[in-house]
Image: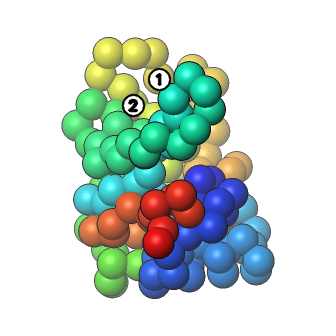
Amino acid sequence: MYVLKNRFKFTANNFILLFIYHFPLKNSWLYFTDSKVVWDELYDPQGNYNGYMVEEDFGKRDYDKEYFRGIQNLKDTKLSERTLFRLNKTNSPYLINEPDLIEVIMENEKSNGDAVKGMSTFDFLDYAILISNSKESIPIFEMK
């Protein structure tokens, strides 16, 4: 994850990322919705920092052209802008033998559906964290 490899401005969302990094939950995954993420740092041909690029849709796997199968269940049941979900509860919508939250469905490209066909979310995940409406982190080169 970008935020963990570089220094960043301290925000509530970054605190969650640090917490996960230092106290990882077994088989957990972080999902973003309606959020911005730093996608890439930009450098000139001499290797000098020249800015950064932010994505609001592509790469987060939660927009109409590229999304995680089953992410709507998280969005419909979130309690706040930062919600931790225990997926292996008895009343979980992920108990079915489907690759929800694992299969990425893409409009113009082949998904990973064949690779995860017949697998369950529980083959990969016990917990999911949904972060909503977050701003992008600020690269260290942008800090004053």
**Residue 21 at x, y = what percent?**
72, 71
Identify which residue, 52 or 56, lies in the foreground: 52
Residue 96 horizontal side relative to residue 119, left or right: left
Q: Quadrant of the N terminus?
A: bottom right
Rendering colour mode:
rainbow
Query: Quick check: marks 2 and 1 in contact, CB under 8 Å?
Result: yes
- Read off the residue under disc 1: 111
Residue visible at 32% across and 83% down in the picture = 80
Image quarter of residue 74:
bottom left
Q: Position of residue 135 (x, y in %)?
A: 33, 66
From the viewer's side, name the closer residue of 24 and 99: 24
Residue closest to the far left: 64
The image position of residue 123, as x and y in percent, is 70, 49
Q: State the image coordinates of residue 8 (x, y, percent, origin top left).
A: 55, 69
The front one of 47 and 102 is: 47
Question: What type is the residue that disc 2 sits on?
Answer: Ile
38 sits left or right of 90 in the view: left
Question: Residue at coordinates 76% horizontally, 77% vertically from top-left?
Answer: 22
Q: Is residue 61 visible?
A: no
Secondary element at image label 2:
strand
Question: Looking at the image, is 107 positioned above or below residue 42?
Answer: above
Q: Is residue 104 left or right of residue 28?
A: left
Which residue is identified by label 2? 105
Residue 18 falls in which quadrant of the image?
A: bottom right
Q: Mark yes or no: residue 116 visible.
A: yes
**How many residues crowd mark 2 within 10 Å: few (<14), some (14–19), many (20+)?**
many
Residue displayed at 31% across by 74% down: 77
Q: Residues within 10 Å of mark 1 (few under 14, many from 20)?
A: some
Q: Nearer the viewer, residue 49 or 117?
A: 49
- The answer for how far apart the CA atoms under marks 2 and 1 are is 5 Å
**Considering only order in the chain, which callout, 1 or 2, is on the residue closer to the N terminus?**
2
